[in-house]
Image: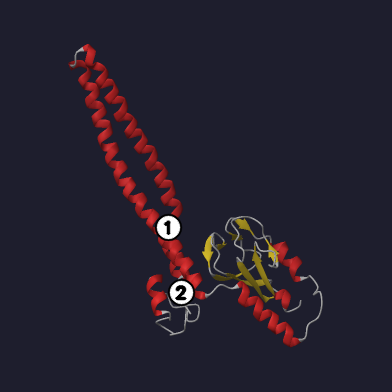
Amino acid sequence: MSSQAKRVTVGRKPGNTIVLTNADVSGDHAILTLIDALTNRWEIQDVGSRNGTFVDGQRILRKEVTPQNKITFGQTPLIWDQLAIVSHKPAAKKQSIADESKTQELKIEFFELPIGEKLKNVYEDFMDKKSRIEEIQKQEALNARYQSLGIPIAALFGASVGFLPPEYRYISIVGTVISLTIAVWSFVKSKKFTVEKKKLNMTKLTEQYDINYRCPYCQVRINDPYPVLRQIKNCRSCKKTLIS
């Protein structure tokens, strides 16, 4: 295998090694680098994609993988046979060592997003989902109040039918129907919110954030919110530049 074949770029743009045309795949989505040809072990790196790169259902920035892992770009799965085809594809022409090195550097620079952009995507994705969970919790509390009031009010309207003149009984019937409708609607909404909150899963969301929102140099978790990080620009631990 040539040194060029050891590095595989994935994305929607025609210039990538593997081109995936699905809308959930970013123009430049990820890079796979062969670590060990004998064991078919690769390192996969997300390059700031909008919809994320996932290994066995977990969103990652960088991770070692083998064909036993399930990899998806957004919702689009990686077919491992595509890597085998790329790995065995002969080079079109030979380059000098200097030219090949230069081409590789340009390729890396073109396909990899700045570190700050990757960290921004991780931070914003986490904050968006966290805000949604908080919004769901508020709606659940409001729906619980509607349910607790809807059924007693419906019962009150129903009981009042016998005490009202015939010409006014329709008020009790309408009130009962409206109260029950509100209670049922609130119950259905609560069920939907429960499903959505379970899907978001704050515990797993926080775990993935802790894994991905780290300095790529020293691997120390970044405690600064991204707006603060954008101001200080450097990792507080190793002092290396994260945002230029």
Residue at x 68% of width, y 76% of height: 36
The residue type indicated by label 1 comes to Lys
Q: Percent from the top left, x then y, of residue 134?
A: 35, 54
Give above or below for 243 relative to 179: below
Give above or below for 96 relative to 193: below
Asked if residue 218 lies left or right of residue 32, the reply is: left
- Front residue of 54/46: it is 46
- Front residue of 44/226: it is 226
- Helix, strand or loop at label 1? It is helix
| Residue 37 in view | no
How far is disc 1 from disc 2 in space, using C-alphas?
19 Å
Residue labelled with disc 1:
129
The residue type indicated by label 2 comes to Arg
Q: Quadrant of residue 105?
A: bottom right
Of the two numbered discs 1 and 2 on the same chain, state the one appearing first in sequence: 1
Residue labelled with disc 2:
214
